[in-house]
Structure formats: structure tokens, C-alpha cells
Image (tube, grey):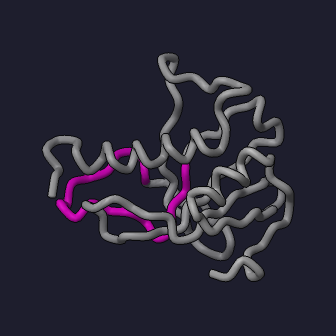
Amino acid sequence: MEEASLRRVFPLLLDDIEYLDARGLAWETLFEEPSRWILVRNFPIPEGYNVSYADIAILLPDSYPTTQIDMAYVFPALSLTSGAAINNVDAIQALDNRSFQRWSRHRTQSNPWRPGLDNLGTHIELIEECFLRETTKNGNTN
């Protein structure tokens, strides 16, 4: 997708822009009342899933970066090629005229949000870790 065709409805923090651009990710910012969303296009999905690339949506809280980013939303919906079930992905989020699969994944007390250290980049890395974890859980390896 060409840079000129990417929607930038609201500005991101410089650290977030630098992270996304350094990774070569095509990203957009969307505002769907009342929420601000970041949409990462053609995000690489690890082996073991039904697709190699998907769009990832991230809900940006109004008080970000003080408040943590939570969860991820994926289009098209992911499934494991092994046929194993993925827990906590049943909810659907309507966004950008599509139905995104909600990945209900949260930080824990041992991995809390650290204002001033955590940002969009650390959240995306957490999403990647969640995707990888599902491919190796319960012996689901290719």
C-alpha cells in the first residue's frame, strides 16, 4: 500500500512513528466514534496459521501512553493450521467496515504496563509473542 493512500486521521507519538517506520510496517490511524485506532496493514503472521499476513488493529486509549494498550484485533480471523483451538478469540469487533477477530490478551502483574518505557512498539512485540505462543502451545508445531 502506498504511503499516500494510508489514512492518518490523528498524530502518533514520535517514538511510535519511528518504531513502525523502522519495522517497515504500513500503518494508519483511524477514528471510529468514540475510539482512536491504529491499523497495521499486512502484518507478518508466523507459520502455523491460516494466513501469512493480516491487518492488526490496536485500540489506543485516550490517556495513552500513561494508560496501557490492551488486546489486538485481527483481520482476517486467524486459525491454527493444526486445527487446535485458540482460546479467547471469539469476540468480533466491527472496524473499518470489516469484522476483526479480538485477541483477548492482557498484561499481568509480572508484566505490567510501565509508563515511560512501554509504548506501541512494546505492545506490538507482545502481540507477536502471543501469536508465536499459540503455535507452540499443546504441541502445536509444524
Up/down of 106 relative to 27, above or below: above
Judged from this view, the residue extending furthest toward the right is 10
Residue appearing at x 61%, y 56% in the figure: 22
Which x, y percent locates residue 5? 74, 82
Quadrant assignment for the N terminus: bottom right
Q: Is residue 75 magenta?
A: yes
On screen, residue 12 above or below 97: above
Determine the residue positioned at 59% across, 64% down. Answer: 25
Taking the image as shown, residue 123 lies to the left or right of residue 44, namely: right
**Residue 66 coordinates in the image, percent (x, y):** 77, 29
From this viewpoint, which residue is outermost toward the front? 22
Quadrant of the rendered image containing residue 79: bottom left
Q: Residue at 16% x, 52% y: name it.
A: 141
Is 67 displayed left or right of 91 in the figure? right
Residue drawn at (81%, 62%) of the image: 31
Residue pushed farthest top? Answer: 109
Q: Which residues are magenta?
A: 72-89
Q: Main secondary structure of the magenta part?
A: loop
Whether 129 is among the magenta residues is no
Tell me if 101 is positioned left or right of 24 in this view. Answer: left
Is 3 drawn above or below residue 21 in the view shown?
below
Number of numbered tags placed on the structure image:
0
- Residue 122 in percent (x, y) is at 57, 39
Q: Quadrant of residue 142?
A: bottom left
Residue nearest the viewer, comparing 2 with 104: 2
Q: Is residue 62 found left or right of 20 in the rendered image?
A: right
Q: At which x and y percent is residue 80?
A: 27, 60
